Image (cartoon, grey):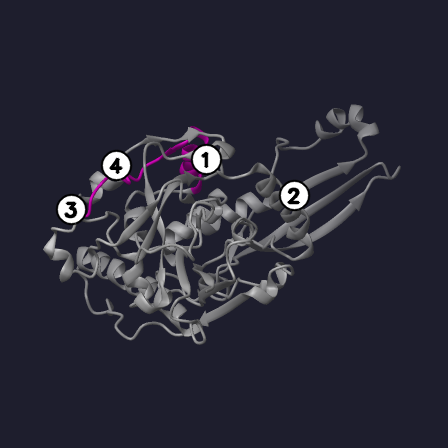
């Protein structure tokens, strides 16, 4: 009997390494499915690279999904905005389901009594409390804690059932496993005989793991929100990077995870839930694993190029130097910014008419700088080409 850990992947290299180290002694093989399109249908590059994890490389199988599902509904000829929003969500759900079910392509050679675990990439099951070889239940659900923005910010009083597992012989498809009701039904419930989501022979694992959602920078979150299945709601709120930064700083989220499927969009999104700072060790995760991975990733971010560009910036520059060589001046103009987003970078150039003059000198000359700048006919201020470029690009958020 073997255990296979299966996920769908977008771009979470550090969290995937945390996953590998936590599940190392329990899992025989890790299966990763990655699509070259986002939930919104935009093309994306393939991000996963198992060479980043040499210790686990021979136990990782990477599937690339390079085609969309055939049942995507077109919105080109429909001008009804509300109808199109519904279709966008429907199409996103189809893409998510398609990517999940593609994992079955890696199940050739998997024995009928082997266990399949499915999680989204930010959900990590805790396997310390389950012995698969002795388990008699048909289905296993992992009751997990939910964390936002950082590893130690928990969404209060919420049980998250993300990771789920069953034997290969019971598996209909991954979407079926994902959609199983998070409740063990009594034997007298005859509706379970006809249901694909309600089960009696089911085991719930307490302290079953961790769901680390939105462990990204504000800029990364902005791009994620614009590309996920609820991007139309995000756009309607006119959310920007600064608003996202405020939410993280104040430790709150807008989404109501307690709302049911019948709740309105307003009931789901017009909320403020304050996150709680917690100790991960008290919730079953050793700090040594986290610290080792974080320390390693600070180094590997450069070595393995996990640090990726967020902006392309070009400009022309003129150089000047003082007679005593103590001061240098550069003048930059004709600035052009391009997004690293695949859908924008080849089509849109954002030009700035600003002219930027910078003074460069050794700190030993600091006492002279005030007298020097008094001769300039303009105010001295701080300026960042990167910030200017990011602001210009994100004003065009509907292009993403």
Marking on residue 73: none
Image coords of residue 65 (percent x, y): 42, 71
Query: Marks 4 and 3, how far apart in space?
Result: 15 Å
- Of mark 2 and mark 3, the one earlier in the sequence is 3
Q: Looking at this view, is 178 or 245 the one in front?
A: 178
- Of mark 2 and mark 4, the one earlier in the sequence is 4
Residue at mark 1: 283
Give the side of residue 354 with respect to residue 63, left or right. Answer: right
- State yes or no: residue 333 in magenta: no
Q: Looking at this view, is 219 or 299 the one in front?
A: 299
Query: Marks 2 and 3, how far apart in space?
Result: 44 Å
Give the side of residue 120 with respect to residue 77, left or right. Answer: right
- Tally the numbered discs: 4
Residue at mark 4: 270
Query: Marks 1 and 3, how far apart in space?
Result: 32 Å
In magenta, the rendered stretch is: 241-261
- Of mark 1 and mark 3, the one earlier in the sequence is 3
- State yes or no: residue 250 in magenta: yes
Q: For label 1, count other residues whose C-alpha is less than 10 Å away and answer few (under 14), some (14-19) or many (20+).
A: some
Query: Marks 1 and 4, how far apart in space?
Result: 29 Å
Give the side of residue 71 with respect to residue 206, left or right. Answer: left
Residue at mark 2: 295
Residue at left offset 67%, top offset 42%: 357
Residue at mark 3: 262
């Amino acid at each position: 009997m073997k255990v296979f850990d299966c996920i769908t992947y977008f771009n979470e290299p550090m969290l995937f390494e945390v996953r590998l180290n936590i599940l190392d002694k329990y899992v025989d093989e890790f299966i990763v499915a990655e699509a070259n399109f986002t939930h919104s249908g935009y093309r994306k590059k393939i991000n996963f690279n198992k060479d980043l994890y040499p210790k686990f490389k021979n136990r990782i199988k990477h599937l690339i999904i390079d085609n969309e599902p055939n049942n995507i509904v077109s919105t080109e000829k429909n001008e009804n905005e509300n109808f199109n929003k519904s279709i966008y969500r429907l199409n996103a759900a189809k893409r998510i389901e398609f990517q999940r079910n593609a994992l079955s392509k890696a199940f050739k050679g998997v024995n009928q009594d082997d266990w399949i675990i499915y999680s989204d990439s930010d959900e990590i099951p805790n396997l310390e409390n389950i012995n698969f070889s002795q388990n008699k239940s048909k289905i296993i659900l992992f009751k997990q804690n939910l964390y936002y923005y950082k590893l130690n910010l928990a969404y209060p009083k919420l049980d998250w059932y993300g990771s789920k597992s069953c034997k290969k012989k019971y598996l209909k498809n991954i979407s079926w496993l994902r959609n199983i009701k998070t409740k063990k039904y009594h034997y007298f419930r005859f509706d379970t005989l006809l249901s694909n989501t309600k089960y009696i022979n089911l085991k719930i694992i307490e302290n079953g793991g961790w769901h680390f959602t939105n462990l990204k920078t504000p800029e990364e979150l902005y791009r994620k929100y614009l590309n996920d299945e609820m991007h139309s709601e995000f756009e309607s709120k006119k959310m920007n990077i600064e608003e996202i930064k405020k939410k993280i700083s104040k430790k709150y989220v807008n989404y109501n995870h307690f709302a049911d499927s019948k709740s309105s969009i307003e009931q789901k999104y017009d909320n403020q839930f304050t996150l709680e700072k917690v100790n991960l060790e008290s919730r079953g995760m050793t700090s040594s694993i986290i610290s080792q991975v974080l320390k390693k990733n600070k180094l590997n971010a450069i070595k393995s190029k996990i640090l990726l560009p967020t902006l392309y910036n070009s400009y022309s520059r003129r150089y000047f130097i003082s007679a005593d060589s103590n001061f240098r001046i550069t003048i930059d103009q004709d600035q052009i910014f391009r997004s690293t987003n695949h859908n924008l970078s080849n089509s849109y150039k954002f030009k700035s008419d600003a002219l930027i003059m910078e003074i460069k000198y050794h700190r030993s000359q600091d006492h002279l700088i005030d007298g020097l700048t008094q001769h300039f006919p303009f105010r001295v201020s701080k300026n960042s080409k990167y910030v200017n470029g990011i602001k210009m690009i994100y004003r065009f958020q509907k292009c993403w």
